Image (cartoon, rainbow, N blue to C red):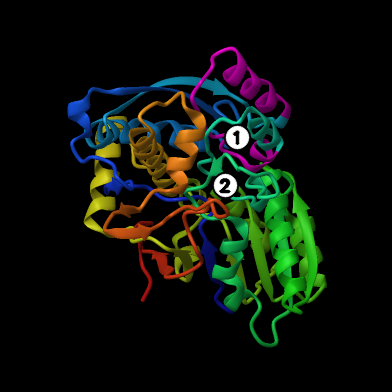
Amino acid sequence: MTKKRVLAGITTGLLLAGGLTACGSSTESSSKGALSVKAGVVGPKTNPASQYWTELERGIELAQDEAEERHGVTFDLVKRDDKGEPETGARLIQELLNQEQVDVLFGPSLSGVALQVAPVIQRAKRPWMTGAPAADGVLDYSTQPNWGFRTNYNNSQNIEAVANIAFGDDKTVGMIYGTDGFGQAGYDAVDAYAKANGLNLVRAEGVDPGSTSMTAQVNTLKKAGIDTVIVWFTTGADHATMMRSMAQVSYDPEIVATATILDPAFTELSKPAEWDTTVFAAPIDFESPEVTELAKRYEERYGEKPLILTVVWALYASTLSYAAAVEEAGDSSDYAAVRDALEGLDSIEILGQKFDKPFSAKDHELFTPEDWIAYEFDESGTVVKAD
């Protein structure tokens, strides 16, 4: 039987344990007295993808000491559970903005909810650190000035990380994706990439998140002669279900390229043999001392290993980026000044990786699709650099 090669691009952003510098900001900010921020935190606490809420919350919590030490900024978190529902998210965002009068919003964690609330936040003209959502449309630059800032990478960048593998010579490419906002946005990004580059996405099958079987979908791809499958799911559990379904129908594509960072559910629900050729692409160094230390600090504080380290990274980065901008503006309630300060940050250093001029008026994305690193699972299920 031909071995599967799995390429996984990361869906969500990264984690920051390094320092930030803002143009003209003082490194002695803590001596000025703390600047207080009232922050709205929105995510799917009660939802099958609740791990995105957990990491949203914990990423901010882990960053708070550094935010106060470096930038003299403290956070009062006002938390809301959007249940992963776009309508609920829109209502709660209105509540946070109008009743709670928060200074900044972190989340929602899922793309479907973020896409729904983006116009609401833009009209409110309040700083928005989007956090985890990867859908390209979350940041709509047709609205200026734009109030959203993303510290992960988007779907278009993500598909570039897998494109050379998925759309190689003589490959017949199909796709399986979740029917939630994240999966639909992923399909849109892959479809757009294929059309823009003269490539053929032969067949695409949507699957409801949490499905216990995907035999119908994988059978459809098998019958269509698909030898390369791009997968876009929110959770590793869905990926594990897909792999079992492929085995049940004796479908053995040459390549399975998944855009999901395979959370612990994948290794818990799958067999080590399925990890052998699994490769993740990411523009960060998970094995750096700083990331290793953060993961250790996470485990000491919460009694478990990070569920999705990339989401922790994204919110840690968002928290410190925003804190640097508040320090520069000098007043968290001067929303336009904070937004301008974010756009004018001179540099951000993340785990030894320096981002010069990370944002601008027309670019609120921290990352570009450059300098990605390949990772795989070792025999214990630990992510390590690929050979």
User: At 55% from the left edge and 21% from the top edge, which residue is drawn?
Assistant: 80
Q: Secondary structure at mark 1?
A: loop
For residue 222, above or below residue 356: below
Residue 259 location (% of width, % of height): 58, 59
Q: Is residue 258 at all visible to an observer of this figure?
A: no
User: At 27% from the left edge and 49% from the top edge, which residue is drawn?
Assistant: 18
Given the image, on which type of amino acid does mark 2 rest?
Thr
Instruction: Kindly report the distance in space between the C-alpha atoms of the residues bearing marks 1 and 2.
Output: 9 Å
For residue 280, above or below residue 325: below
The span picked out in magenta is 87-115
Magenta run includes residue 304: no
Given the image, on which type of amino acid does mark 1 rest?
Pro
- Whether residues under marks 1 and 2 lie with C-beta atoms below 8 angstroms apart, the answer is yes
Label number found at residue 217: none
Image-quadrant location for residue 256 = bottom right
- Residue position marked by numbered label 2 in the rendering: 235
Q: Nearer the viewer, residue 25 or 311?
A: 25
Q: Is residue 82 at all visible to an observer of this figure?
A: yes
Q: Is residue 296 found left or right of 184 in the rendered image?
A: left
